Amino acid sequence: MDKTIGIFGGGQLGRMMAQAALPLNIQCVFYEANTDCPSAALGPIFSSKDNCLKSFIQSADVFSLEFENTPLNEVDTLLADEKNIHPPRTALAIAQNRLSEKNLFKRLDIPVAPFLAVDNLEDIHSAVDKLGLPIVLKTAMGGYDGKGQFVLRSEDQILQAWDELGDAKHLIAESFVEFSREVSIIAVRGQDGDVKTWPLAENHHHQGILSHSIVPAPNSDDLQPIAQEYITRLLNHLDYVGVLTLELFVTPQGLYANEMAPRVHNSGHWSIEGAICSQFENHIRAVAGLPLGSTAFISPTVMINIIGKHPNIADVLSLEGVHLHLYNKSERAGRKLGHITLMPKDPTQLTTLCQKLAKILPEPLALTEDMTI
Amino acid sequence: MDKTIGIFGGGQLGRMMAQAALPLNIQCVFYEANTDCPSAALGPIFSSKDNCLKSFIQSADVFSLEFENTPLNEVDTLLADEKNIHPPRTALAIAQNRLSEKNLFKRLDIPVAPFLAVDNLEDIHSAVDKLGLPIVLKTAMGGYDGKGQFVLRSEDQILQAWDELGDAKHLIAESFVEFSREVSIIAVRGQDGDVKTWPLAENHHHQGILSHSIVPAPNSDDLQPIAQEYITRLLNHLDYVGVLTLELFVTPQGLYANEMAPRVHNSGHWSIEGAICSQFENHIRAVAGLPLGSTAFISPTVMINIIGKHPNIADVLSLEGVHLHLYNKSERAGRKLGHITLMPKDPTQLTTLCQKLAKILPEPLALTEDMTI
């Protein structure tokens, strides 16, 4: 192998990064609590339970992550060893704190919903006064897939909200944004500063979990250059290397930034088949200091998550233009077990394919039998 | 994992099969002399040097191969254990003997150049009388990449030819076919008898080694249905399961079958990016008893072999629409170290890309700076 990349985390994102790295003669190694994780098929797992951080750091030339809550003190340990990590520590620290993140968006003139810091019960009352109702309360740190959030619709919910989230101590209160849809932009920046951006994905959720993404997002020609401009500002400001994701709301007032993820993203899984170069390969290329590949899309795609239960594999594969990606995980409610990318030779078949798939999947989430794309 | 497939051989073909198997939750294990082989990154290697055949057989649910010279007695051992192998033993036995292979082609009305069995020096004289000159002498068993062949152009070469090849005892003498180009057809047959065929590849060689393949083969609309008919006859006659390759010569008299390979093939590597479902994934699907994927091509491609020496990776990746596949092999003259698939978003850029690549590759083989596709 030419190079070894150490990845913090060993889930499906690490698995797909390592799959993209292999044909470039790049080996991945992982730092992860569970040695039986999805990435284990592709490289050694250094157990974070067994205090293997030092040997993990020694085992690789350069580092990255698949998990934005990678502890900063672990990153500091590798930096002290004069090893590099991409994306940079700063980007990680900011992404781990919703308040720092929103402040950065503001500083870079990326529109966000009005927000306030909330550290106690009194601050919630004050936020309601200043921002009006409804507001969304979120823990500043931690929380994902809709966890660690409370939508406050009336003042008599304030106590309940504090009861649920107050333990986190630092919260953020955001004006509730009336949005027509959620989109995400994914971009990659190389070590030479080259930036490439994939087309916008339109994301559909079910109970806080991503159900499916449509790429390119329908009717997004006007939005694409704006979203590209926002994410490029972030990448350059942070002197970022690797893949960055920015989730945005489409509102009557234009695009509002929701949050960023300093890593490859579920809404970019379509790019394995749908783009000339996938988010996984380009992330690996960036981390390894190689030139970036084209992010142009090949054909319109829909990416659907497999959640909680596995479908009948033969039923799924019998559909034309289906790409199945399983993560070798056991079934559990709400768990991402795999994804399916639909890329029929004839893109007008996408709606029909989605409808057929909705009948096959045990948990179709927001996919419906009468949907049209 | 849902299923384990045992592969005879652990080279790059096994590596790419295992890469295709992983997203289907299918694990591959390998039987191979060299435990440091290209497939080792993707699954355990059972060493054929250490008498590990029994444990290899116990470790998998079903078997396949990446090496057509897999010893038949090893296949018999697994069959005696009531395990299955795809493709079937018969197909393997026929493909291991050029004479049996040519006889099968004749029996199925697949045109071949006139041929005769040669077991001694006298048979060569007789073949020259009956077939005329030039003739091609080949060992009936063994030999690949142009090895084990002798082109006999005049009678005074007969002794030299016998001297070089006679040790093999069983030879075949074939009329020299005047062909304009070589093409190959790759098809897959599922356990339910479903047959799917990829577009014809036009193959260019340099000193007996495949240099590059152009897919679809230019001006092949008339040839495609004929080649499909031939390979379908073979697949059905052999009750074949998995991927089969048939190499054909384009002659003024039409297509002549040259040889078949009972496995995925170098001229099908383009299908990883260029087809909806690759030869590797469809082979795995067939062996695992799953429905086959579409073999339709997405966009015209050129696949180029990296032989002997590695190019500068950054130079290669800086070209737009390049897909690099390295096999983690050390450099050695004539050795296949990897391949590159060119699939630019704009297919009219293929010629330009090939020309650029010819300047970058240390061993461009038949790729030239003034080529046009």
Image (cartoon, coloured by chain):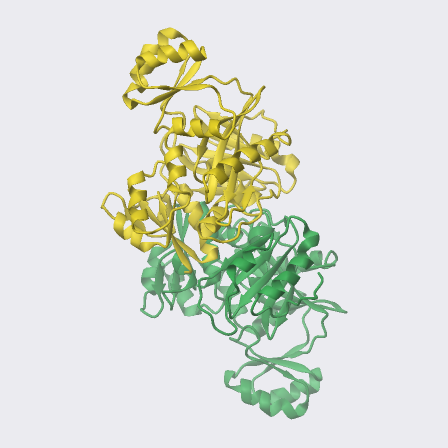
Chain colours: A green, B yellow
Q: Is residue A287 left or right of residue B138?
A: right
Q: Quadrant of residue B125?
A: top left
The answer to whether any part of residue A216 appears in the image is no
Q: Quadrant of the C terminus of chain B?
A: top right
Image x and y of residue B126, in percent:
37, 11
Q: Quadrant of the N terminus of chain B?
A: bottom left
The residue located at (68%, 78%) in the rendering is A175
Task: Give the residue at the far left of this rendering.
Answer: B50
The answer to whether any part of residue A291 appears in the image is yes
Image x and y of residue A199, in percent:
65, 55
B59 vs A53: above or below: above
Tally of marks: 0
Question: Who is closer to the viewer here, B321 or A87?
Answer: B321
Q: Is residue A272 left or right of residue B313?
A: right
Q: Quadrant of residue B238?
A: top left
A31 vs B227: above or below: below
Q: Is residue B216 left or right of residue A132?
A: left
